[in-house]
Image (cartoon, grey):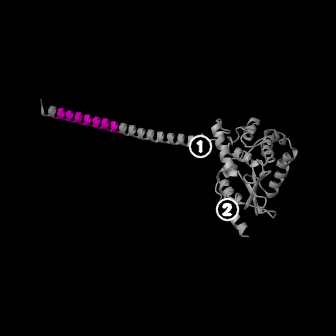
Amino acid sequence: MTPVESDEEDLTRKERREQARAQRKAMEEAAAASAARRTRLTQLGIVASVVVVAIIVILVATGGGSKKGIPSSKHEQNSVVHQVSALVGGIPQKGNVLGSPTAPVSLQYFGDLECPICQKFTLGALPTVISKWVRTGKLRIEYRSLETATREPEVFKAQQVAAYAAGKQNKAWNFIETFYHEQGEEDSGYVTEKYIQGIASQVPGLSLAQWTTDRGNQELASEVTVTDAQAASNAGFDGTPSFLIGHSGGAMSKLEYSNPEDPGFINEAMEKLLKA
């Protein structure tokens, strides 16, 4: 073998070693990248699993993200009845007014029974207001109707008149509170005659026969569609819940709020009015 041939062979072997080394390095880098991808996918899978579990927990805790309406079990219905009775039981009612007729301050609460923001107020802030001010005889609350969330005017009139008809037996607030506790998903068409009957059947001591008769009272229908609607218009209200507050028998003023679940806006107004 000549020196030239030896040098060429050595060069060829060196090239092959370099080529093999390069191939090995490429394979190692590919393997490392693959392992990294698997690690990232595993991590993403874990994160996704945690998110899914969290979503499931939230959905279970909130009833699937929407209100299901009247509970199917008697036990759940009895639970709502107990909550409502504990809230308004023992407080004077007359028509759609809750509280002592001699209370120094009056609050008008304009609501739509299908309004989800009204539900937030009724279940969030109102229990504190009732406990602190209504039960102690300092505040009376008058529920009034304003169509906002309910899509069909006839459905709106039927559900609001049903509440006012319960007021003929001094049970309007039991009906109203039960409705808000069991409010269905907005725009789902859940308010049917069966649903309204189901709410009424959960009001303790309500004579369903008298209630059915009173639902046909045209004065109640006029109160919902004319009197309350005109009062809301005069106050400039176009959303619910909306409020007027003032000394009983005196001038009423708008009560603004930022969070319907926080009773602070009513507490502050009450303290100012009572001091005055």
Where residue 146 appears, x then y in whole percent?
78, 50
Q: Is mark 2 on a helix, strand or loop?
A: helix
* Mark 2 lies on residue: 267
Mark 1 is surrounded, within 10 Å at the Cα level, by few (under 14), some (14 to 19) or many (20 or more) other residues, namely: few
Q: Where are the magenta residues, as a range?
A: 7-32
Residue 252 occupies quadrant = bottom right
The x and y percentages for residue 81 are 68, 44
| Residue 185 horizontal side relative to residue 49, left or right | right
Nearer to the camera, 173 or 61: 173
Q: Tell me if mark 2 has few (under 14), some (14-19) or many (20+) residues whose alpha carbon lies within 10 angstroms of its own.
A: some
Q: Main secondary structure of the magenta part?
A: helix
The amino acid type of the residue labelled 2 equals Asn
In the image, what residue occupies the spot 22% across and 35% down?
17
Q: Does the magenta stretch include residue 31?
A: yes
In-image side of 263 versus 171 (left or right): left
Q: Which residue is drawn at 70% across and 63% down?
A: 270
**In the image, is residue 234 above or below residue 173?**
below
Q: Quadrant of residue 12?
A: top left
Residue 184 percent across, percent down from the top left: 68, 41
Residue at the far top in the pictured view: 1
Instruction: From the image, tell me which residue sits under label 1.
Output: 62
